Amino acid sequence: MINRRRRLRANTAIRDLVRETILTPKDFIFPIFAVEGENIKEEISSMPGNYHYSVDRLYEIIDEVEKAGIRGVILFGLPGSKDECGTSAWIDDGIVQRAVRKVKELSKDILVITDICMCQFTSHGHCGIIKNDVIDNDASLHYLSKIALSHAKAGADMVAPSDMMDGRVLAIRNILDENNFKNVSIMSYSAKYSSAFYGPFREAAHSAPKSRDRKTYQMDPANINEAMCEIEDDIKEGADIVMIKPALSYLDVIRWARDRFDVPIAAYSVSGEFAMVKAAAEKGLINEKNVAMEMLTSIKRAGAHIIITYYAIDACRWLKEV
Ligand code: PBG
């Protein structure tokens, strides 16, 4: 007998009924870039359709996010000044802290997540503290904890360490607990690869390292067993959600993580993934909507519960169209 699989592909109705993976606005987290200054909404050239917002204009994007039905945003900040140890990352009136307070004021419902890292705030552009010419793991933990605490004080619901130092989740969990922020959760960038797909973000966030690369702390793209070790460590240290980043070239990592661990899995579809689709669409080489939706569907099919994507708002609009 021939298995006539095509019977279940015959028309839209039957395809809709048997579809295994369904995207919804609730799957997405939208990244937002806050900058110092006033009355700024400036398109990010490396990421068309994404903007730098000054705090006073965040209401425009928060309004769009709410209308789209998206539940969470992740905030990145571009500070006014940088130094060796990233002071502007933890001060009370730092750019991220002010953005958090503003978003909290604008919306009761949107989950506010903050990226915890130093690269946007250090003069050298690395994600940790440099001592004797190396990124010093344990010295960096002290500063990362300070950043997390200051974000929690500003009102962040969740902090997301993206630096890849060892032990940061434990250090952050401890400082939050000691300061009565037991309910602030941690989404760890657990398996964050040293990827060339971050290029457009580094331009957007002015966070490229001034010298060398991030290979001594971010993971080798060739490794997957190591990713499982990283995730296991982070869960043991207290991560509530673990993340794999980038997404598209790491769908196997997402699937392995989903099969092995019982905590929610997030995937970050990064700037390069977004920019590639944009560029190809602008050249008329691909259909932007169809390619973007196929990408997002594949990330969910691979096992991600949560997808961080620059396409979040567009995707919500496209979901309504079908
Ligand atoms: C900060 C950070 C980066 C991204 C998120 N947080 C850049 C990096 O590690 O260089 C990348 C996000 C993207 O490319 O969309 N460490």
Image (cartoon, grey):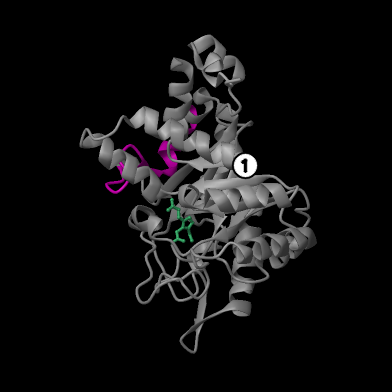
- The quarter holding residue 175 reads bottom right
Which of 20/176 is in front?
Answer: 20
Identify the magenta region.
43-63
Q: Residue furthest left?
A: 283
Q: Using a 10 Å C-alpha cutoff, classify the residue at mark 1 as few (fewer than 14 neighbours), some (14 to 19) or many (20 or more).
A: many
- In terms of depth relative to the viewer, which is nearer, 249 or 126? 249
Image position of 175 (left or right of 188): right
Taking depth in this image into account, of 48 and 87 the one nearest to the observer is 48
Which residue appears at 56% of the width and 16% of the height? 8
Regarding residue 60, the answer to whether it shows in the image is no
Q: Is residue 122 left or right of residue 28?
A: left
Q: Does the segment drawn in magenta span residue 297?
A: no
Q: Residue at x 54, y 10 (%)?
A: 13
- Give coordinates of residue 218: x percent, y percent: 51, 67
Q: Residue at x 52, y 43 (%)?
A: 308
Answer above or below: position of 217 versus 43.
below
Whole-percent x, y for residue 309 in the image: 47, 41
